[in-house]
Image (cartoon, rainbow, N blue to C red):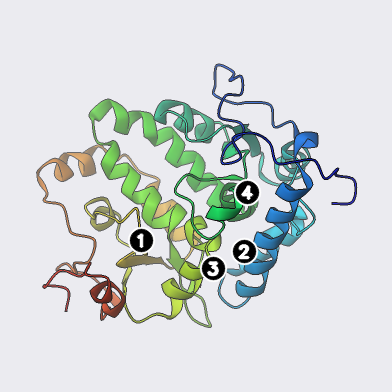
Amino acid sequence: MSNQSLEAEPLNPRNRYANARRNADWTIDQNWPSYSAQEHDRWNRLFARQAKLLPGRACDAFLEAKARLGLSGSGIPDFADLSEKLSAMTGWRVVPVAGLIPDDAFFDHLANRRFPAGAFIRPEEELDYLEEPDVFHDVFGHVPLLANPVYAAFLEAYGKGGRRALDRGQLHHLARLYWYTVEFGLMTSPVGLRIFGAGIMSSPAETIFALEDTSPNRVAFDLERIMRTKYLIDDFQQTYFVIDSFEQLLHDCYQDFAPLYDRLRSAPDIEAHALAEGDRIIAKGDFHYFRAKGKAPASAA
């Protein structure tokens, strides 16, 4: 950006907020003026790459909301300005955090329509893949859909359900719902499958893989099935789940999970690659990508 000086990169460039003073709710001061020209340029290049790939692949709600919020390749957004726009649409705000925060704090933020977003941007050497969510993943990938009233209601309900899952010792089941929808969800459209998960939205390689590669399974959304299904944290997904609409997602998840949790206690987990009885299969994967990497079990045929 033209008004940014060309100072050297901050110390600890991978996450310069790592030692920032945290408030009781784990939020920090974004200190937007402190971003360097190099950090803004990194956002701009990441934004431009995804903006080119997503039309015709991302769901319409995401593309429309990105435009309404004014997200652009003109530097890292100021969370205060972004929150003002978002709040006027759905009552959500974006709050800066240094990185991953404790589960109870995360759920509390969501339950109160606050999305905790990492304030740091990935270093140059991790431009294509980063394990910990940064400002590009969190703001570009997650925030636009918070402008959609139905999706916004779903994520609020998810936050409210988080405490119960923690208290019951079944957070791993609820986490799978987040993983396979909020992070890596697909949805139907009149012209084919579309992306709505933030983990795909912010990854150029997975944008193509999730929609166009023949490797993964694509299976229709089923709440209990998803909560039983393991996932991969260090590679593309072996199975993607497909919703029909955000209305379906909200309807199916806006319920008392207690009976479901009771059933899940005795139900075996389903491996990430496996198809299960009762699945409505949209596409059966051939797993060629995973075989080439030695990651496909013999049963994944």
Residue 273 versus residue 156 in the image, above or below: below
In the image, which is nearer the foreground, mark 4 or mark 3? 3
User: What's the distance in space between the residues labelled 1 and 4, CA to CA?
Assistant: 22 Å
Mark closer to the chain start, 1 or 4? 4
Give the residue at mark 2: 61
Residue 284 seen in this snapshot = no
Identified by mark 1, the residue type is: Asp
Q: Residues within 10 Å of mark 3 (few under 14, many from 20)?
A: some
User: What's the distance in space between the residues labelled 2 and 1, CA to CA?
Assistant: 27 Å
Q: Is residue 109 left or right of residue 6?
A: left
Say which element carries label 1. Answer: loop
User: What's the distance in space between the residues labelled 4 and 3, CA to CA?
Assistant: 16 Å
Across and down, in percent, residue 37 comes to 78, 48
Across and down, in percent, residue 9 comes to 70, 41
Q: Which mark is residue 139?
A: 4
Say which element carries label 3. Answer: helix
Which of the two residues, 227 or 1, is positioned nearer the viewer here? 1
The residue shown at (59%, 35%) is 12
Say which element carries label 2. Answer: helix
Marks 3 and 1 close (CB-CB < 8 Å): no
For residue 116, which quarter of the picture? top right
Mark closer to the chain start, 4 or 3? 4
Identified by mark 3, the residue type is: Pro
Give the residue at mark 3: 204
The residue shown at (42%, 26%) is 104
Report the residue that reaches farthest toward the right: 3
The residue shown at (28%, 25%) is 167
Give the residue at mark 1: 235
Q: Residues within 10 Å of mark 1 (few under 14, many from 20)?
A: few
Across and down, in percent, residue 45 comes to 69, 62
Say which element carries label 4. Answer: helix
